[in-house]
Each structure stands twice: as C-alpha cells, then as structure tokens.
Image (tube, coloured by chain):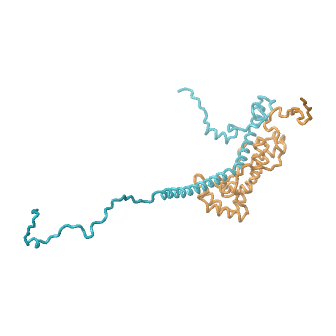
Amino acid sequence: MSFSRSVVKMSAGWKNIKYRQDMPPPGGYGAVPYKRNLPVRGLGGFTLFGLGIGLSAIGVKMLWERKVLEQFTNQESHQAELVYYPLLQAEKDRTELRLHKEKIESEALNIVGTGFDPTYEPGIGNVYHTPMYEPALMESLSPFWQSIKLWYQPPNIEKLGP
Amino acid sequence: MPGNFINPYGHVPVDTTAFEEAAGVKEKIDPELAGILKDIKRGDLGVPSHVLKASAFQYANECNEVNKEFMLCREEELDPRKCLKYNLKVSDCAENFFRKMTTACADEIVAFGTCLERDHKRSFVYCRDEQVKFDRCMFEKLGIDKKYHAVELDQTVKTDRPAPKNPFKLKNYDHPQPLMPDWNRPLPKIED
C-alpha cells in the first residue's frame, strides 16, 4: 500500500481495472427498530373471562334442564308405584285375617277339643290377653305358609353321633 | 278358561281351612259372621306389575278417594277387622277399573306394558309413544283422563265413620276432668 502526502501520479492502468466497491444503498439505510415490540397475541384479557363465563353458563343451563327432567321422571315413576299401596295393603289385610281365623280355630281344636282346658274361651288370639289386635305371623298353620317356612327356616336335624 | 289374557285363570286361588262348614259349627254361626268369613276368602287381583304401573294415573283418577278412606280407617282404628267394609270397596273399585280397561284398550296396554318391562327400573322415559296411544285410547273410549298429582300431601278425607275413642285400648281412659277455678271471676281490689 502506498500512503503519502505528496501527490503521486499513479499509473494510467488503474482505470482499466473494473470493480464495484461495496457502498451503502442509495438513500442510505433505513431506521433501526430500537423501540419495544410486545404485540397482543390471542384473545387475552376480558375476552377470555367472558368466553369462560359464557361457556359455563351454557353448560349450567344444559345441566339445569337435565336435572329438572330427571326430577320429573323420578317423581312420575315414584307416584305410579305409590298409587297402588292401599290396594296391596288391602290384599295383605285379607290374608292376615285368614291367618287370624286359622289361629283361633287352632285354639278351639287344640285346647278345647283335645280336653286340655275345656273352660278356655277361644277368640283372643294372643297369650297375655291384651285387647289390642296382634297380627298373625308367618309361623301360622296354613299349609301354604308352612311350605314356604321349610325353605326359609330349614328344620334342625339333630346329629345323634359322628 | 275364565278371565282375560292378562289373567287367564280368572283369579288367584285362596288357600284356607273350611272349619266353618263343619256339621257342629254351621248351626252356631250368625249370618253376619258367615258373611264376614266369606268376604275374607276373596282373592287378589292377578294383574302383573308392569300393567299396574302403566295404568297408574288413570287408576288414581278413579279410585283415590276410596283408597284414602281405607288408609284413614286403618291408621285410626289400628285393626283390620274394623275396616273390612272399606277393604272390599277398594278391591271392587280396582276390579271395575281393570275390567273396563282391559275390554276397551287391550292392545295399547299390552304394548305399553311389554315396553316397560324392557327397562330394569320400569321407567316411562323409553315408552312415550306407547304411553300417548294408551292415554288417547282411554280418554276417547272411556272418558278417563290422567291425574297429574296422583299422590297428594296434606289431604283431607271424607268418611261416614265417626272417629274412634281409645284406639290403643288404654285403661282409665275415661277419668273425669279435674275441677279448675273460674279464671274470669271478679277479684277484690288491693289498696296500698
């Protein structure tokens, strides 16, 4: 390299060399974006809260309607079963009265008829002579109930030995 | 066979003794007692549970008053021997209702009942088409509508039977009331 203060006449051949110097673009470079860049991405803020509350409200409404429908169907089903309680109780009362009749018949046959206590007056239906009505139990004398008793309470067969 | 296709045998037979038909006993029975002994030999309705549930709201419209009377008697008297009159009325009402229903709307009730049987809880939700057809048939042919509140709370019942006295059969129930003073008598003035 040649650095000198004096003007040195360079040779003419330098102009024949064709090259392009790396210069800045015409008009200069643009402005440098030095400021803060924090763009708002997505929904954000109150919109998100509103979306959440809105979708929850839609879900709550769906659940409320389902709950009302479920309550109505359960009440409908329950009422249809309760309506027949008196009819079934009336039929049970008639079977109870039939068993009561058999109980008193057994008093007459087994106490008076056999001669165990001829002065006994049947018609009470209980041991301690209470005036209240005591309903008959399943251990009464009808053969139908006796046949069921053998299923629910099998007899105690005593083991006489190993 | 007597009866209908729901209960082809006509009735559920009753299994009891026949002591009252014996020789030495027949002469000593009053006709009133003989009537009672015949009444308690009445059998049950042979209607299956899916048919009962299907026709519940129409049955409530017809027979709710009679049923309430019977339940009131049962709870007040605590003795089924004293409520036999209402017991038979309940069975009569039910018998008449089911007889009418099975003669008028047989196909609809059978379809509804078999649809109900498919659900283990016998819920009405899966059988709305059959329910509509049955309700329409009942209303058009017999004029019987459904009852919305089939089972009511806080209800009053009308009966001819007077209220019972001493249903628990307590002794000394008729003690006389103690004598109390006349609270509104004129009192003497007190001067300080």
Q: Position of residue B105 (x, y in %)?
A: 68, 62
Towards the viewer: A145 or B156: B156
Q: Position of residue B30 (x, y in %)?
A: 84, 43
Q: Which chain is orange?
A: B
Q: How many marks?
A: 0
Residue at figure coordinates x 15%, y 70% from the top left: A19
Q: Position of residue B78 (x, y in %)?
A: 76, 41
- Asked whether, in this view, residue A33 is left or right of residue B157, the answer is left
Seen in the picture, residue B90 relative to A14 is either above or below; the reply is above
Q: Position of residue B14 (x, y in %)?
A: 71, 47
Seen in the picture, residue B132 relative to A101 is either above or below; the reply is below
Towards the viewer: B166 or B96: B166
Q: Considering the image in quadrants, where does the C terminus of chain B appear?
A: top right
Q: Which chain is cyan?
A: A
Seen in the picture, residue B51 relative to A151 is either above or below; the reply is below
Residue at figure coordinates x 21%, y 67% from the top left: A23
Q: Considering the image in quadrants, where does the N terminus of chain B appear?
A: bottom right
Towards the viewer: B73 or B118: B73
Query: In which quarter of the view is residue B57 placed?
Result: bottom right
Query: In which quarter of the view is residue A92 placed?
Result: top right
Towards the viewer: B24 or A35: A35
